Image: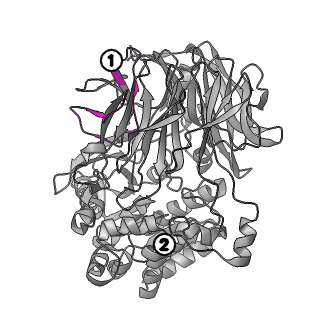
């Protein structure tokens, strides 16, 4: 093993020992989650944030901490919200957006005593910022707020509806402001206190997602979202360079898909970034393959870095400290790690071997050290300090010591191919104490999983994966096969990529686990959130392998989305998928794929959970199931975001899903009198 454990936390990292307690929903909800590790420029300290929810307060708070290899973490601040953490280049402190002097602002925070003071005028709204390498300047993004009388004027005179600006959230939120104006790039000089605006000629930018200073401080790269065009993908982003000496702006890349994560070479002459770029010569839709590109001064088209591997959803790269290699973080749905590849191309190798999950890498000024988050299926996340050359790491924190005494089911990675030959993977959790050959009810949860700490279904806050296993279920956290890009409007190819192929992988997984004696074919459930809800509802309308289901915050690919979302971007997507609107010749495509049009084929009872916005578009399938007398229950969480984050919502949702699948697949009812009405409703759904 190529890692180092500090003596103070050696015993804290031992998990899975005897005499452990049962996991509870409180344990899941109130675990401490590290985010945004930031190593100091000199590589000696790491600042990081910790988010923790409280059931008692029904809220979450974020705390700011500082740790070194020689001392335990020290808390510098705690607030309802802290974000955009960065180091001041001279190592004297950190900056972050948090409350200060009665306002939320970009503040300087002392690493000695946590004292804070505004860095800029607190009235300035900062959505993004970056320190210059010498610490003399700060580039930041701001925008003007809505006109003071805009809301009143809209209320009195009405609003001209623009489907490129407005959408369903304007209706549900009763807010008809167009929001702030176009983003502005400003540079603040620390010595003089003066501010200048740059990049005024980026008139096409609707939002700015990233800023990166060149090491010599003379240039600024800007990643931005351009105004939408019909030929663009849904997540398009462009890159430009601002020469701060001349205040001129030059485009680097203006492709029709996402170009992101631009970083400067040590000599300030080249940019490396990730993009779909020329990987997509046929202008296919929903392309996920991506590659690395290098743009070199004085300009011209970027050069693609030829790689031996095929990569998907790359977020960027950076030059190593020699300027001859590239480092990039890759999540491949098996693990996340930092990889190294020659800048001229070739094959990549992992900086840290093994199967543990390493993410959120942040580098010191030399590029020789990085801070990161390490975790695994039954190993709670910790902050680590990584030596880039050797791959050795030092564990700096022990944020969740309680999990040392809590019983968790190990996750075993499985890989399989469906009947079309497409491979995918998943992580199987089995009930503790299950005997070899004992068949158990199986739950499939989709999607986007890796070897990460698993109490709930990783990013899904509604599915208590470990409690399902503790209640006697086999749980498969399943990834669907990689999307296969399709030509715009090619319904056959689109439905194969987004429906037929994933369902074939689900069916193969069930067959595989039934045949090896793990799963009981007569007791199989499925659940998913967001796109996973679409996969769930597609599965129960196009297959009979599932006996119970749950879906949250989905509703995708139903005909009503074409108008009820009120957004041009959604129509663009649906035209790409179905070939046109749910009218005329393309109506039959909707009839073939849409869950609502196939509600008569549903036999599995379906639990549906939604917030107020997506909940409106979800009513299409709900209404059809109710009209047909199909077993369905729909729950709305008022004011909830896309992924439930309020502790009371998470508690209710996880308990409801646990009860739902136990009721339908294990014939179990919790004797708690408070749940009597729930079970009465569910018994009435049986026919």
Residue drawn at x 50%, y 78% is 683
Residue 334 is situated, as x and y percent measured from the top left of the image, at 34, 39
* Colouring scheme applied when the structure was drawn: one colour
Specify whether residue 324 is painted magenta. Answer: yes
Q: Nearer the viewer, residue 54 or 178?
A: 178
Looking at the image, the residue that sits furthest to the right is: 101
**Quarter of the picture holding the C terminus:** bottom left
The span from disc 2 to disc 1 (Cα, nearest Å) is 51 Å
State the mark number for residue 324: 1
Write the start and end of the magenta stretch as one range.
298-326
**Residue 458 seen in render:** no
Residue identified by numbered label 2: 618
Residue drawn at x 55%, y 44% is 22
- Figure check: 220 above or below 433: above
Circle 1 — which element?
Answer: loop
Image quadrant of residue 391? top left
- Figure check: 120 above or below 231: above
- Figure check: 572 above or below 590: above
């Amino acid at each position: 093993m190529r890692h180092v454990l500090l003596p103070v936390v050696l015993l804290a990292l031992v998990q899975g020992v005897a005499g452990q307690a049962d996991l509870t929903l409180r344990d899941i909800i109130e675990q401490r989650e590290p985010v945004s590790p930031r190593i100091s420029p000199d590589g000696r300290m790491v600042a990081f944030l910790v988010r923790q929810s409280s059931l008692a307060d029904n809220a979450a708070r974020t705390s700011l901490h500082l740790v070194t290899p020689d001392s335990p973490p020290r808390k510098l601040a705690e607030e309802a919200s802290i974000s955009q953490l960065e180091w001041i280049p001279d190592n004297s402190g950190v900056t972050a957006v948090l409350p200060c002097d009665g306002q939320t602002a970009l503040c300087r925070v002392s690493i000695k005593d946590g004292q804070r003071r505004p860095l800029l005028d607190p009235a300035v709204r900062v959505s993004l910022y970056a320190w210059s390498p010498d610490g003399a300047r700060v580039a930041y993004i701001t925008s003007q707020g809505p006109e003071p009388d805009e809301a009143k004027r809209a209320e009195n005179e009405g609003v001209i509806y623009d489907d490129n600006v407005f959408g369903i959230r304007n209706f549900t939120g009763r807010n008809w402001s167009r929001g702030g104006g176009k983003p502005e790039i400003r540079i603040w000089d620390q010595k003089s206190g003066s501010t200048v605006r740059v990049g005024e000629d980026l008139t096409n930018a609707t939002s700015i997602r990233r800023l990166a200073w060149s090491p010599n401080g003379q240039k600024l790269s800007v990643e931005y979202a351009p105004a939408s065009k019909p030929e663009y993908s849904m997540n398009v982003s462009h890159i430009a360079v601002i020469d701060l000496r001349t205040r001129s702006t030059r485009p680097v890349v203006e492709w029709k898909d996402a170009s992101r994560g631009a970083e400067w070479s040590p000599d300030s002459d080249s940019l490396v970034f990730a993009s779909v770029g020329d990987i997509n010569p046929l202008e296919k839709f929903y392309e996920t393959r991506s590659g690395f590109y290098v743009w070199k001064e004085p300009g011209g088209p970027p050069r693609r870095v030829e790689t031996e591997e095929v990569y998907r959803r790359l977020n960027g790269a950076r030059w190593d400290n020699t300027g001859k290699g590239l480092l990039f973080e890759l999540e491949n749905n098996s693990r996340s790690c930092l990889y190294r590849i020659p800048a001229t191309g070739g094959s990549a190798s992992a900086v840290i071997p093994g199967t543990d999950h390493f993410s959120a890498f942040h580098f010191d000024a030399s590029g020789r050290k990085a801070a990161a988050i390490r975790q695994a299926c039954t190993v709670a996340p910790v902050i680590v300090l990584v030596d880039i050359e050797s791959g050795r790491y030092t564990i700096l924190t022990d944020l969740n010591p309680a999990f040392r005494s809590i019983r968790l089911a190990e996750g075993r990675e499985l890989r399989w191919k469906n009947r079309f030959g497409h491979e995918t993977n998943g992580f199987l959790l089995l009930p503790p104490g299950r005997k070899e050959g004992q068949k158990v009810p199986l739950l499939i949860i989709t999607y986007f999983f890796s070897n990460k700490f698993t109490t709930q279904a990783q990013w899904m806050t509604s599915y208590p994966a470990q409690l399902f296993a503790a209640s006697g279920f086999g749980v498969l956290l399943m990834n669907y096969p990689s999307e296969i890009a399709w030509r715009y409007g090619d319904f056959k190819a689109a439905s194969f990529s987004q429906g037929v192929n994933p369902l074939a992988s689900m069916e193969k997984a069930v067959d595989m686990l039934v045949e090896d004696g793990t799963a009981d074919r007569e007791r199989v459930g499925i659940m998913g959130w967001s796109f996973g809800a679409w996969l769930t509802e597609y599965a129960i309308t196009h297959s009979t392998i599932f006996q119970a289901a749950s879906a949250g915050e989905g509703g995708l690919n139903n005909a009503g989305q074409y108008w009820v979302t009120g957004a041009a971007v959604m129509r663009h997507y649906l035209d790409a998928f179905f070939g046109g609107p749910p009218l005329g010749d393309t109506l039959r495509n909707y009839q073939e794929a849409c869950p609502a049009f196939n509600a008569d084929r549903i036999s599995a009872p379906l639990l549906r959970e939604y917030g107020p916005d997506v909940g409106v578009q979800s009513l299409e399938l709900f209404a059809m199931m109710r009209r047909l007398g199909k077993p369905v229950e729909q729950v709305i969480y008022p004011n909830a975001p896309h992924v439930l984050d309020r502790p009371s919502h998470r508690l209710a949702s996880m308990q409801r899903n646990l009860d739902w699948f136990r009721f339908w697949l294990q014939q179990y009812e919790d004797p708690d009198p408070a749940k009597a009405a729930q079970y009465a409703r569910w018994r009435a759904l049986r026919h």
